Amino acid sequence: MKLDQLKIGARLGAGFGTVLLLLVLIVMLSFSRLVMTEQGFDGALDVEHRVARADEWKSLTTLNVSRTIAIVKSGGMPQMTAFLTPQMKDTSEQITRVQKELEAELSHERSKALFGDISEKRKAYIGQREAALALLKAGDAAAVEALLEKSLLPASKVYLAAIEDFSNFERELAVQSAAAVKSDVQRSKLMLLVLAGVSIFLGSLSAWVLTRSVTAPLRRASASTQAIAAGDLSQPIDAAGRDEVADLQRSLGKMQNSLREMVSAVRLSTDSITTASSEIATGNQDLSARTEQTASNLQETASSMEQLTGTVKQTAESARTANQLASSAQATAAKGGKVVSQVVSTMEDINASSKKIADIIGVIDGIAFQTNILALNAAVEAARAGEQGRGFAVVAGEVRNLAQRSAQAAKEIKDLIGASVERVESGSKLVADAGRTMSEIVGSVQRVSDIIGEITAAAAEQSDGIGQVNTAVTNLDQMTQQNAALVEESAAAAESLKDQAIRLAASVSVFRVDAHGVVSRPAAVTPSLPAPSAPRAPVKAAPTARVAKAPPVLRDSVTSAKPAPVVAAAAATAAPGDDWETF
């Protein structure tokens, strides 16, 4: 379908609709890629959580192994056994909870296999530990020492090694997840760049096509008006299409046909000028004054219309510039919204990490407390041993001091981490509010861009309408000036009828008309004799150039002029460069 079959508004709507459709496509694709990236980040965080739980499992297991070795090395000392056995039981329960949580989170087959191996190694280690404690309770120290060296310690090392293998594999999964997320981000960037390039190309192509569909017919219409202004009425005006420019061309065609018929009629009516010269002289003075007044008013109107045309064009240009600035502001606001969303995600990650650090500090505090208890017990036992345990008592005292200092430092760090968590949570709320504000800004900028687009379209339509009115006023001004010149020159009709007819014929000969525009010669009309009137002073003909802006003249009613019995003259138009003296 040809574009000239559509209205200009429909073309502009289709162009802007195409651009908006591309924008919606880019937004939808960006949203889907962001969702995929978010899923990748969630997977990486899950893997990091499993690694942390595995490290916790290993540390708890190491702690229980140390307690078991301490009980065995103490020879089953009742105080040591009574003190460490409940702690070992609590730690085993913690390990069981960690084991269940990890088992519920696993999805990878290799992770499940490694986890099953850890469970088997744990069962074997617990069996060896229970056997050692049973022998210790029975009082068989030699068997306990042999079991410790041959079975218990190797089983604990195998158990811890299995946990370490599982933790290392989960770390590899974390690295792979991070690499996959990075790869998805790179692909998203490339895809967005390609879509942006395609959108720019299609938008530029639509703008170029729409511009040509409007300017090309306007250039043809301008050429037709220039030909008419130059006096060429023989050129056909092609008015193909159904848009506003085609309507303008059809109007120009009608005007050209009217001018052609008028010029032909004037050419054929030159013989009738001689019969109407006396009636022309009668009403010449009054008509001259009125024509000059009309010419002055039309020139003022034409000047005002030119100024109004310039103002409307400037307004349309300013509206287009504002539309571009609004589109740029919308893109900038959208980028700001994305950055704020990323900041929100980063603040949430920092908050989670701070909470994890607080948990780890709590564990360190517990270990320091337990170490302090052990050092206290060791100091008590050293005191009981007398001189033989004095050196051990000094070491136990130093260990206790170190444990107290570690507990105090852990408490201070925990307080600092708690304050940091509160500040991070406050910052997360502020950033979330900023994200919502940026979303509102994006919506407001979009609404402003739509309003400015409507203003631009309305200003363009006003500019076209004022241009048409200006053209019509200019043509009317030319016709009025020609009439004024005709009236002035017709004042000399009484003195030289022949010269007047010759000059009128020369002026009309400027127009070129085709054979179809010639009007048949009217039949000769016998003029009626005018009523006798008072003798009129002869009017002296003076050569004049183009009529300038005439001063305002009062319109007095003229009663002495009698109407002519036959009016056969018609107004003729000429190009702006015609010499008005040829009338």
Image: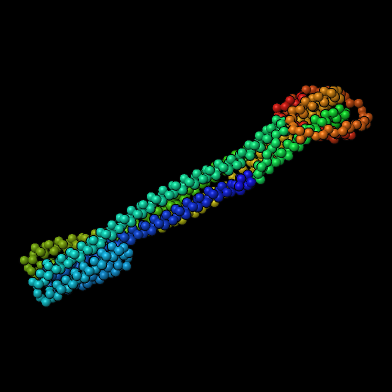
The part of the image, by quadrant, that contains residue 236 is top right
Residue at image point 16% right, 69% down: 68
Residue at image point 36% right, 59% down: 42
Residue at image point 32% right, 67% down: 104
**For residue 263, above or below residue 450:** above
Q: How is the image coloured?
A: rainbow
In this view, which residue lies farthest toward the right? 532
**For residue 395, above or below residue 298:** below
- The answer to whether residue 153 is visible is yes
**For residue 380, above or below residue 573:** below
Is residue 445 or residue 511 the one in the foreground? 511
The part of the image, by quadrant, that contains residue 466 is top right
Quadrant the C terminus occupies: top right
In this view, which residue lies farthest toward the front? 515
Is residue 229 or residue 550 the one in the foreground? 229
The x and y percentages for residue 508 are 77, 29
Q: In the displayed structure, does residue 131 sit left or right of residue 184?
A: left
Is residue 435 or residue 335 the one in the foreground? 335
Q: In the displayed structure, does residue 264 sit left or right of residue 230?
A: right
- The answer to whether residue 448 is visible is no
The x and y percentages for residue 198 are 48, 46
**For residue 328, above or below residue 380:** above
The part of the image, by quadrant, that contains residue 84 is bottom left
The x and y percentages for residue 384 are 9, 70
The x and y percentages for residue 557 are 85, 35
Q: In the displayed structure, does residue 141 sit left or right of residue 190?
A: left
Q: In the displayed structure, does residue 514 sit left or right of residue 556?
A: left
Residue at image point 63% right, 44% down: 4
